[in-house]
Amino acid sequence: MAHASAFGVALPHRAVDRLSGELLARYAVRAEELGFGDLWVTENVVDRNFCLAPALALGHAAAVTERIRLGVAVVVLPVHHPIDVADAFGTLQNLSGGRAILGVGLGRPHHYEAFGVPVERRVTRFAESVRAVRALWRDPVADFRGELVELDGIALSSRPAAPPPIWFGGGTAAALRRVARSADGWIGSGGGESVARSAATS
């Protein structure tokens, strides 16, 4: 039986020199014309290179395309408030006609230092933030009580009709267990080698 696989491609959003909106638009249109399934960006808020904010770069691509999906790999979720993440990618989901993919991950210690967020208990903060984002997208008025994250009667103004899928990043055995429990998809960190390494340590 033949199986068709959709291939994604990186949208140019990070470089040594500044990138123009015209370049992004032309690239996105051509990727869709060539039949790619997804456009992907990364999050690099603190970076010596030039880098565009993921939701805004993908929103620019959404405006000039019709079918190609729009994903980030990944937002370092524990350093952001879940309301901000839910709003940004809820907006992208609305404007793109339901083509957004929110990839989330734990990031590295320097991300936490830059944002002034404790690195301790980051897995708990991550898991609770995922649940909070889903509640904000799902419920007209969201309430959530976690150990580190709380929502008290929040009505998200950009709540999409259909929530975007949430994919988890990571290549460790613990990360893959989180994927199996709670994610809609997986973003590997290092390709097939990371899968083999994770399987060997699980």
Image: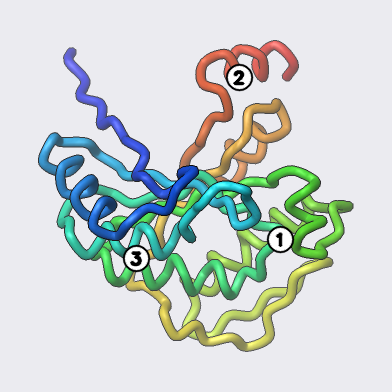
Name the image quarter holding the C terminus: top right
Name the residue that disc number 3 marks. Answer: 93
Q: Residues within 10 Å of mark 3 (few under 14, many from 20)?
A: many
Left/right placement of residue 136 relative to residue 115 reads: left
- Looking at this view, name the residue that lies furthest to the front: 17
Q: Name the residue type under label 1.
A: Val
Image quadrant where one finds the N terminus: top left
Residue situated furthest left in the rendering: 33
Crowding at mark 1 (Cα within 10 Å: few <14, some 14-19, many 20+): many
Earlier sequence position, callout 3 versus callout 2:
3
User: Would residue 184 be seen by someone viewing this image from the given angle?
Assistant: no
Q: Quadrant of residue 10?
A: top left
Name the residue beneath numbered marker 1.
79
Q: Residue at x 62, y 50 (%)?
A: 47
- What amino acid is at disc 2? Ser
Mark 3 to mark 2 CA distance (whole Å) = 30 Å
Question: What is the quadrant of residue 2 in the picture?
Answer: top left
Indicate whether 143 appears above or below 53.
below
Alpha carbons under labels 1 and 2: distance apart: 25 Å
Q: Nearer the viewer, residue 170 or 29?
A: 29
Label 2: element kind:
helix
Report the side of 102 relative to 104 (left or right): left
Q: Which residue is mark 2?
A: 194
> The residue tagged with tag 3: helix, strand or loop?
helix
Distance from disc 3 to disc 1, alpha carbons, whole Å, reads: 22 Å
Question: Does 53 sit above or below residue 184?
Answer: below
Amino acid tagged 3: Gln
Residue 108, how many percent across, how many down?
Answer: 74, 43
* Residue 55 x, y percent position in the rendering: 43, 62
